[in-house]
Image (tube, helix red, strand yellow):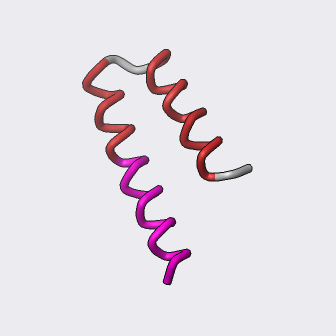
Amino acid sequence: MSREMALKQAEYVAEHYFDDEEEAAFLNELNRYYENDVLREKG
């Protein structure tokens, strides 16, 4: 599964199953890991 697909699925879950505060915290953390992974791949 690609990173982009995983990110979209996580966003869907956050929007439908978390309240606004939890959603924001979850997506912030997820985006941090996503960005770190992209940077790690670039070297």
Q: Position of residue 19 (x, y in %)?
A: 34, 17
Q: Position of residue 16 (x, y in %)?
A: 49, 15
Residue lying farthest to the bottom in this orientation: 43
User: In the drawing, does residue 2 fall left or right of residue 20?
Assistant: right
| Image point (32%, 44%), residue name | 28
Identify whether 21 is placed above or below 28: above
Instruction: Magenta stretch: give its range.
Output: 29-43
Residue 33 lies left or right of residue 3; in this view the side is left
Q: Is residue 3 above or below residue 21?
A: below
Q: Is residue 33 magenta?
A: yes
Image quadrant in which you'd find residue 32: bottom left
Q: At 37% across and 38% down in the image, what residue appears?
A: 26
Residue at screen point 36% across, 48% down: 29
Q: Residue furthest right?
A: 1
Q: Quadrant of residue 27?
A: top left
On the image, the x and y values in percent for residue 20 come to 29, 20
Number of numbered callouts drawn: 0
Magenta segment main secondary structure: helix
Residue 38 versus residue 42 in the image, above or below: above
3 inside magenta stretch: no
List x then y, in percent, for residue 6: 62, 43
